[in-house]
Image (cartoon, rainbow, N blue to C red):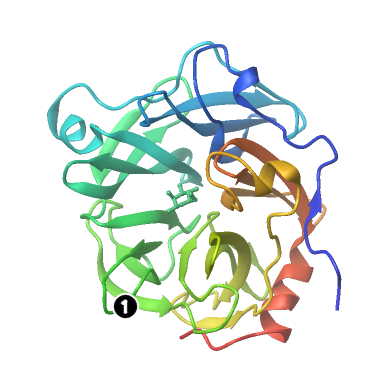
Amino acid sequence: MKKEYVKRYEGNPILTKADVPYKVETVHNAGVVRHEGRYVMLFRSHLDTGRSILGKAVSEDGFRFTVEAEPFMVPAKEGVFAEYEAFGVEDPRIHPLEGAYYITYSAYSEHGVRIGLAKTTDFETLERVAFITQADYRNTVLFPEKIGGRYVKLDRPHSEISPWSMWIAYSPDLRHWGDSRVILKPVTYHWDQMKIGPGAPPIKTKKGWLTIYHGVYPTMDGSVYRLGVCLHQLDDPAVILGVSDRWILSPEDPWELVGYVHNVVFSCAAVPEEDGTVKLYWGAADTVMCAGTAVIDELVDLCLRCGRAPM
Ligand code: BMA
């Protein structure tokens, strides 16, 4: 059994609030994508109101990022988006899809948390498309292409009877979603027994769609957020081919163990590279951004060899 699936970048943390030219309290839970030969990061920051906004940073190598002078996305000022984003926008995931970048984000308001969908082609302007869930949903990721003629998303509703599980849903137009089903649940006395949620947008591999997700374990000292992997069938991603019973990343470095919320590694981004590796990005202790690399085939293999039951 391999000891380490994710190799941490030696320069971690890669981004902190000291790198941000405007006043923020944290830099975490960022979406990252390759755009025109560079890496673009949209990161979440807490303000000193406790509410969140999104900033933008750009990098040549995927590790050393420069933050832009102004925030990229703040709560909308008018209309339906203003009503549902009043308490902040959080945890962006960026999806290259049909020539544009679709951004899913958590929108908070007095009505709860729901998922907004926004669109950009250049990371200069941003168009809000629609809310694609009701409350209380978080952690929505889109598959990077249509499957069976429809768009597909994973997300994470919550209910008392079936806590914090991963669901799949389908859409003809990215706005209207249906045919939803639960596909992966926390299972008692496994590392992710308390809650799970999709992390990075799924990655296409020969053996299936690879999803990096977060799993939470309750302890006497609060919850621990770790990262794990599962594999979906290529032509029917509702079918889970394997889910690893071992985590791939657990809080270890000092900035992962201690911060705004301690013992957290939380990912919204994984960028597959042509050499078969993936650059993985995670927020550490809800305070700073970190990065590392993994070998995609090893993660796929882990899903298939070291599986637990999906539910
Ligand atoms: C989750 C979300 C994440 C956060 C994590 C750890 O419920 O709020 O944005 O990183 O908790 O605090």
Residue 151 in sight from this viewpoint: no
Q: Is residue 73 left or right of residue 247?
A: left
| Residue sitting at x 29%, y 33% | 128
210 or 205: nearer the viewer: 210
Q: Is residue 208 above or below residue 14?
A: below
Circle 1 residues within 10 Å: few <14, some 14–19, many ≥20: few
Residue ID at (75%, 33%): 63
Q: Secondary structure at mark 1?
A: loop
Figure quadrant of the N terminus: bottom right
Spot occupied by residue 295 in the image (x, y as percentages of width and height): 79, 61
Q: Is residue 113 visible?
A: yes
The picture places residue 137, in percent across and down from the top left corner, at 30, 57
Residue beneath the point at 55% across and 72% down: 192
Q: Position of residue 197 (x, y in %)?
A: 46, 63
Residue sitting farthest toward the bottom: 309
Q: Is mark 1 within 8 Å of ligand 1?
A: no
In the displayed structure, 272 sits above or below 221; it is above
Q: How many marks?
A: 1
Query: Residue at the location (32% across, 66% down)?
Result: 170
Q: Position of residue 43 (x, y in %)?
A: 53, 33
Q: Nearer the viewer, residue 169 or 220?
A: 220
In depth, the one of 264 and 266 nearer the eye is 264
Q: Is residue 123 left or right of residue 277?
A: left
Residue under label 1:
162
State whether residue 190 is above or below residue 146: below
Question: Residue 151 appears in which quarter of the rendering?
Answer: bottom left
Q: Say left or right for 1 vs 33.
A: right
Q: Amino acid at mark 1?
A: Ser
